[in-house]
Every structure is written in structure tokens, then in C-alpha cells.
Image (cartoon, helix red, strand yellow):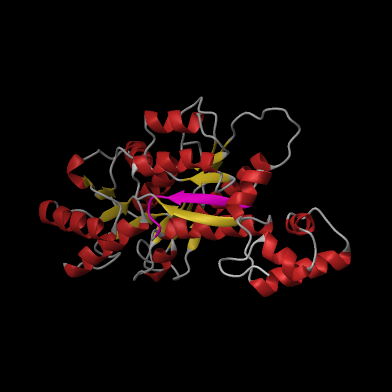
Amino acid sequence: MSSGGPPTIVSIAERAGVSIASVSRVLNGLGARPETEDRVRRAATELGYVPNAVARSLKGGHTRQLTFAVPDIGNPVYVAMVREIQAVAKAAGYRLLLHSTDADVAEELGVVRSLADRTSDGLVLVPIRITPEHVEALTAAPGPVVVIGSLPDGVPVDAVQADSVTGAALAVHHLVQAGRRRIAFVNGPVDTVPGGNRARGYRGALAACGLPYDPGLVTATDFGVGAGARAVARLLDARPGLDAVFCANDQLAIGAVQALHARGWRIPEDAAVAGMDDSDLAVAAWPPLTSVDLGAGERGRRAARMLLERLGPGDGEPVPARRTTAAPRLVVRGSTSPGAAPAGSDEQEGARSA
């Protein structure tokens, strides 16, 4: 009997007392006599044999693995997406590989091109910027890709979008209806897809409400908690008359709440605060945070299903790239409405594509 090194089909055949061909048939699911199959599987277990997924994928064309690539693995929005994608993938017999790109374009392009290595069968990608290089790589992708985000028309890739423009408008209209007139806006970088769309929603809603756009009430840095705290501290130094702060995500809004508390401002009496994403942070904040639910989990679920449909047998006919948009929903809590219950109530409006 062979010894040393990891177990192979040769050592399994020796242990089971069958031919190498029989071992190969059993391990590749091609069938054998029940007695032979039982002996092979028992020998494989005793020897601690682990199938090589990469080698199997090169031979059979499938790994039963999917990749999910996100800019920030710690962002609660992407955690919500992971939960839903994992659930859909697992139910279909797939494992999920997670890749954090740090929003680096080269990393995102690399993970698209890595589909050629056949270590996974398909990719769900969340880019916050779409460059010409993205368009080129996605168009030439060596495997199925679904993007969670907005893509230019004509890119032959499935995409699941958030309607950030309408979502931002929902928040601003709510603040105006609550009597707020000096509404600051704390955004992330405006050269990103979410930053640009949320800025457009903010400005459009101000105009629709008959309020002037004041660039002195707008600041943009990045999407983190610290950035939100620093931005609001600067706004308070320059513009003490503000009565509301609308933030492009919940992380920024948590920072805004911290900065207001540090100055002794009461929320919402002195200034109301609203965020976007309706992540777990919104419920954990004090007071609980009014936020726009952009359907993070729903977007993840739709993306996973679209990817699996691309991986299905199909009928041989090419299917055009599909676009779907999750409708936003405003969840009102104590940070804008003193009487709101911690769990919040919903104010819903229709959505348009962003």
C-alpha cells in the first residue's frame, strides 16, 4: 500500500481493493455497483481524501462556487447582501466566496478577469465607480457577471440597481414636511455612483419644495462614520443655523449624530437627522435613525437569482442583459420625529430608475 503524502485515487484503490477506474467513476459521480461504491467511499473517508475542486472544475466545467466582490466587507449594507446571496446560493447547491476590493478599480477588474481561472462559476460585483475600464472588462468577462449598481446603457451585463435619486428625495421631502428649512447634506465622493445619485436627489427635492440650494450646507468626503462627524463639526462651525442633516448613508448619519451630541444639540428638537440604507446601525443609534431603505437584501437576492439563471442550462438562445430596480422606502424613527416609536413607521412612495 502506498504511504506518505496526501491520499490519491491510487491509494484509495489499494485500500478499497478495486481498480483505479472504479475509484474514478465513484468520485466523479458516474456510478458503480453499490458494493464497489460503498468500499470506495469508506476507503476515501478512512484516508481523509478531499476532492480537488479546481481540478474537478477544469475537467467538468463547474466548481459549484460563486464569488461576491464588495468595496467594504465591514459595511452593514454589504453584510445584508451577503446574507441573502448566501441563502440563495446555498439553496441551489453553491458555496459563496467573498472578496473585498476596497473600491480599488484594479482589484475589481482583476476579480472579473479571474473568472477565466475557473475557480468560481460566476460573479456578483458591487462597484461604486464605473470607469471605461469597467465597461471593457465587463463586456469581455469570461464568465457570467451580475452587477449590483448602475451601468451605462449598452453594457451587456445584468444589473440590479438602487433608486438613490428617489430615495434621497423621500428623505428631503420628509424633513421639509417636518418643518425643516435649512437642510445640510453630508455626502460621500460625488464621483461615485451612489454619491452622484444622492446629490441629484437632494438638489431635485429642494427645488421641488421651493427651497434654495446652498453649497455652504453641502459637504462630501467619504462614506464612513468619522467622515460624517468631521463634516458636521465643520458645518456647525460655519453654519449654526441649520435645522436638519441629511446623510448619504447611515454611517455618515451616525457620525452626524455624534457631532451634534458633542456640541450639546438635541435630536430632533434642535436638528433632525436622516440617513440612507436603513442598516442595522439605524436601529442601534440613539435616537433611532430615520433612514431610506434601499433594499440591500432584496438587491442581493435578485442578483443571486439572476446569476443562477445565467448558469442554468437555458435553451441555447442568447438572453439580453437585464436591468431591475429595487424601490426605496422611507422608515421614520425618532431622529426626525419625536413621537416615532423606536421600530419606526413606514412612509412609502413610488420609485423611478436611477
Highlighted magenta segment, given as a residue range: 63-73
| Camera-side residue of 210 and 343 | 343
Residue at 36% of width from left, 67% of height from top?
Answer: 338
| Camera-side residue of 347 and 319 | 319
Res 265 quadrant in image: bottom left
Give x and y (percent) for residue 274. Answer: 35, 56
Q: Residue 117, can we see it?
A: yes
Residue at 38% of width from left, 63% of height from top?
Answer: 289
Residue at 59% of width from left, 34% of height from top?
Answer: 322
In this view, the residue farthest toward the bottom is 46
| Camera-side residue of 85 and 282 | 85
Give x and y (percent) for residue 92. Answer: 68, 55
In this view, the residue farthest toward the left is 237
In this view, the residue farthest toward the front is 1
Name the quarter where the N terminus is drawn: bottom right
Give x and y (percent) for residue 104. Answer: 33, 44
* 134 versus 247 height, above or below: above
| Camera-side residue of 90 and 240 | 90
- Whether residue 70 appears in magenta in the rendering, the answer is yes
* 313 versus 180 height, above or below: above
- Whether residue 207 appears in magenta in the rendering, the answer is no
Q: Is 7 on the left or on the right of 134, as rendered?
A: right
**Badge count:** 0
* 169 versus 331 height, above or below: above
Q: Is 93 on the left or on the right of 31, as rendered?
A: left
Res 29 quadrant in image: bottom right
Q: Residue 149, can we see it?
A: no
Residue at 75% of width from left, 68% of height from top?
Answer: 41
Give x and y (percent) for residue 42. Answer: 75, 72
Q: Is 226 on the left or on the right of 127, as rendered?
A: left
* 65 versus 18 height, above or below: above
